[in-house]
Amino acid sequence: MSVLVFTALIALGSLVAGFLGSLTGLGGGVVIVPLLALVFHVDMRYAIGASLVSVIATSSGAAAAYVREGFSNIRIGMFLEIATTVGAIAGALIATHVSTATIAIVFGLVLIYSAYLSVRGQPASPVVENQDPLARALRLDGDYPTAEGRERYTVHRIPLGFGLMFGAGTLSGLLGIGSGAVKVLAMDQAMRIPFKVSTTTSNFMIGVTAAASAGIYLARGYIDPGIAMPVVLGALAGSMLGAKVLVNARTKYLRAVFGVVIVALGIEMIFNGFTGRL
Amino acid sequence: MNSSEGKKSGKAMRPFGSGRSAEAAQFSAWKDQRMELIIGNLLRAGVLLSAGVVVIGGIIYVSRHGRAIPDYRDFRGELSPLRNFAGIIHGTLQLSGRAIIQFGLLLLIATPVARVIFSAVAFAWERDYLYAAFTLAVLAVLTYSLFGGSLH
């Protein structure tokens, strides 16, 4: 396979990954790393480096669209980014010290968990409860548009959410993914932030989190232009296409199919990690 | 009399805090959103600019090396000259396709950093010093990663 064919195939694969990632809300990174490692036999370190920069492209490219919808909460995002960026640096440093087989196994587990979250679907919005004093001091509470007009919500269990966000950042830096699934878990489940607010705020945090590990990846030589070029361009084009289609797409079956693909990739990653092939 | 009634009903509609602070919060949320929209559009421009640079570098790279056989099975990243700013700038000035791609990727990594800088300025301008401080903390972490990266 020549450089020309290799570049074209990776760009095409990343385009499909970016497209499905934006339609299902799981992000393209979770598929790009296994695609590069399992199909194109690219070293895990090059794969996570390329995936990480594509994550920055898709997150930053979509930021304006998410803000316009009026769901994302900038204060929650900025406050929690303190945790995710420190976590991302920790993850990137861990990545340079553990074997690629270990990274593959952790990656596989995160894939299976992401698929589970995707299939489980959108939980009901939490009811408005008593205000949390810490949320009040930090002015984290906000409101978001619903069918019955703008509805207020209040943020809970901030230390737990902050800790989980550190974990999300660590996974992002370790695996070169946006780790949107863990970010949503922290905001939606732990902090009881409405689902729509969680997903859009998470998307807007992903780019900044990824930039924190990108510096370390770059210095370690994880970002190779020959692989990153088709991955970034493909994933960016795919996610922009996905955002256009998203408005009137029925994503229920797509999520199920994508979920099955992700579980299969996860099992394959774990298997290859244990047999030492990655 | 009339105006005090108006204030009372205003209070009743807002479950949290006193009327004035809720109004202030709403106004600041509106300002937050406007500011983020401007920043969001700047970000998209940054992403498109860096994608353009990556495309140019990609065309040069593929046209020169399209027939070579790629081999990424083994990791040799630590030997790459494109691991730091000096190496990337040096290669870009020599019109190396790989260096130009890497320069575009560097611009891409800089877009979220620019967003954080803009947010810090905007929070300070709103006199929201708590959040300006949070934003500067995030900026410090990013700076450490980008400029202290070679020290690890």
Image (cartoon, coloured by chain):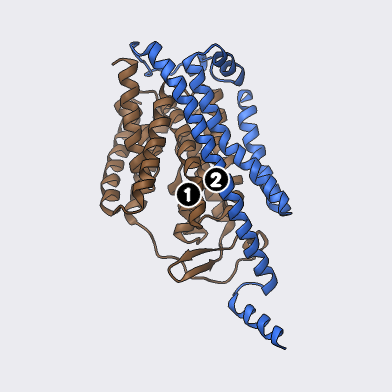
Chain colours: A brown, B blue
- For the residues bearing labels 2 and 1, Cβ distance under 8 angstroms: yes
| Secondary element at tag 2 | helix
Distance between the alpha carbons at the discs numbered 2 and 1: 8 Å
Query: On screen, A71 above or below B108?
Result: below
Q: Residue at x 70, y 71 (%)?
A: B20
Q: Are marks 2 and 1 in one subunit?
A: no
> Is residue A41 visible in this depiction of the protein?
no
Q: Quadrant of the N terminus of chain A?
A: top left
Q: Determine whether, in the image, residue A154 is placed left or right of residue B127.
A: left
Three-letter amino acid code of the residue under disc 1? Ala
| Secondary element at tag 1 | helix
Query: On screen, B3 above or below B151?
Result: below
Q: Determine whether, in the image, residue B110 is placed left or right of residue A101.
A: right
Place residue A99 in its image quadrant.
top left
> Is residue A58 visible in this depiction of the protein?
yes
Q: Residue at x 58, y 50 (%)?
A: B36
Residue where numbered disc 1 is placed: A65
Residue B30, how many percent across, how many down?
A: 60, 59
